[in-house]
Image: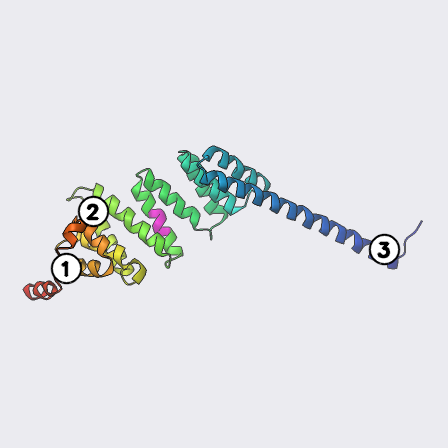
Amino acid sequence: MSMSRSSFLPALLLFICSLLCASCATSSSTDSRVETHLQAGTALLDRKDFDASLTEFDKALALDRKNPAALYDSILALCESGKFDLALQRADNGFKEHPNYLEFLQIKARILYYQKNYREALDCYARSLALNPADGQTHLAYLKALSTYIDTLPADDADRTVYLALLEKEALQLSKTADYAGEAYYYLAKYHPDEISYQIFLYQADKEKWKELNGITDDEQSQTTGPDPAAVKDTAAGQ
């Protein structure tokens, strides 16, 4: 039995459409199952059932290996389980596969920081900020990591001078942003205790951080009005 060209084309189009529909249905079904495992994993993570949550995230990855949310959540579960080496491996792989997903760089930095690999953590934060300079939270994490690393270095260590300069540059830049000025001036005042202007700016931006830095209790706070702004002029006149 022969088929004419005119009857063959509609049949071919119908066949292609059926394949596309089947493909879409399969994709939709897979997406739905991935989402189910992600939701289950998140719920278990919230309940601190870390091994069970990791199982759910891995099931999601088995269905969609390149799903960044599933991979990132699996790293969280690994960290909570104390499996840092595997978490670091997945963070590296995640950033290679999803270079625009900076969360992989940032969580790698947090893991390295937790492991006290401060230099490597700082490198990760710096790479992330180079790609997204507007990320205020990563700026804060970078400042904290800089401060922690600086505090481990002897006073006469040449690296301390280098990293203090980095911290000051970073903090001065961040101090221009109202939401982060308190944190920025906290670190500036911490490492420049004789610079009264930093104390004043910190007090104006965040009184609680000023009290924390100076070890002032609530009772003591009621007896002081903070640093004297006039001292800035006195300091400048004496220089």
Q: Magenta span covers which residues?
A: 123-127
Q: Amino acid at mark 1?
A: Thr
Corner quadrant of residue 169: bottom left
How far is disc 1 from disc 3 in space, using C-alphas? Answer: 90 Å
Q: Residues within 10 Å of mark 2 (few under 14, many from 20)?
A: some
Q: Is residue 71 left or right of residue 23?
A: left
Q: Secondary structure at mark 3?
A: helix
Q: Secondary structure at mark 1?
A: loop
Sequence-wise first label, 3 or 2: 3
The question of residue 124 being in magenta is answered with yes
The residue carrying mark 2 is: 160
Q: Are marks 3 and 2 in contact (CB under 8 Å)?
A: no
Q: Residues within 10 Å of mark 1 (few under 14, many from 20)?
A: few
Expressed as whole percent of the image width and height from the top left, the position of residue 205 reads: 24, 60
The residue located at (56%, 41%) in the rendering is 37
Sequence-wise first label, 1 or 2: 2
Name the residue furthest left: 238
Q: Amino acid at mark 2?
A: Arg
Expressed as whole percent of the image width and height from the top left, the position of residue 230 reads: 10, 65
Q: Nearer the viewer, mark 1 or mark 2?
A: 1
Kindly identify which numbered label has been placed on residue 225: 1
The residue located at (74%, 49%) in the rendering is 19
Q: Quadrant of the C terminus?
A: bottom left
Q: Secondary structure at mark 2?
A: helix
How far is disc 1 from disc 2 in space, using C-alphas? Answer: 34 Å
Expressed as whole percent of the image width and height from the top left, the position of residue 89 reads: 44, 38
